[in-house]
């Protein structure tokens, strides 16, 4: 398993509580081919935010998709999530530590 995919898989429970899928993330993921239109519709059909995020994370199965996911997070202003994913793989930074600085 690739490094980014490994981090996303290991930190899934924390990630699904902080990703914001409703303000452009799905658009960017589809336009970058990280998700298909059908997958987008599946995510949009779910009401609970954490379940939407859970579904998005389920669809990330390759390193390429994970890299596109990181870029989509950046494009939608979710830099704190990108920092968590990237730093977690290198230095063991916790998500709580990143959010405490806001």
Image (cartoon, rainbow, N blue to C red):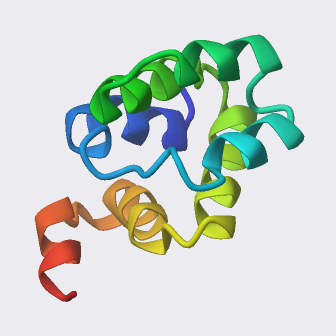
Q: Residue at x 29, y 32 (%)?
A: 50
Q: Looking at the picture, does residue 17 appear above or below residue 100?
A: above
Residue 73 percent across, percent down from the top left: 58, 58
**The quadrant where residue 54 appears:** top left
Q: Nearer the viewer, residue 85 or 73?
A: 73
Q: Looking at the picture, does residue 36 appear above or below residue 77?
A: above
Confirm whether residue 52 shows in the render.
yes
Q: Is residue 72 left or right of residue 37?
A: left
Q: Residue at x 23, y 75 (%)?
A: 98
Q: Is residue 77 left or right of residue 52?
A: right
**The quadrant where residue 47 appears:** top left
Residue 32 percent across, percent down from the top left: 86, 42
Residue 4 percent across, percent down from the top left: 52, 43
Q: Nearer the viewer, residue 1 or 100?
A: 100
Q: Residue at x 69, y 59 (%)?
A: 71
Q: Looking at the picture, does residue 94 appear above or below residue 35?
A: below
Confirm whether residue 94 shows in the render.
no
Residue 99 percent across, percent down from the top left: 19, 74
Quarter of the image with the C terminus is bottom left
Q: Is residue 87 left or right of residue 29?
A: left
What count of labels does the image hold?
Answer: 0
Q: Residue at x 67, y 17 (%)?
A: 41
**The quadrant where residue 81 appears:** bottom left
Q: Nearer the viewer, residue 14 or 51?
A: 51
Q: Is residue 27 left or right of residue 92?
A: right
């Amino acid at each position: 398993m690739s490094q980014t995919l490994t981090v996303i898989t290991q930190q899934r429970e924390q990630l699904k509580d902080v990703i914001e899928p409703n303000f452009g993330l799905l658009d960017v993921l589809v336009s970058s081919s990280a998700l298909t239109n059908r997958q987008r519709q599946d995510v949009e059909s779910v009401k609970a935010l954490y379940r939407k995020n859970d579904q998005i994370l389920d669809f990330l199965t390759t390193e390429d998709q994970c890299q596109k996911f990181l870029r989509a997070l950046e494009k939608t202003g979710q830099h704190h999530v990108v920092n968590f994913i990237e730093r977690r793989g290198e230095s063991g930074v916790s998500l709580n530590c990143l959010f405490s600085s806001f």
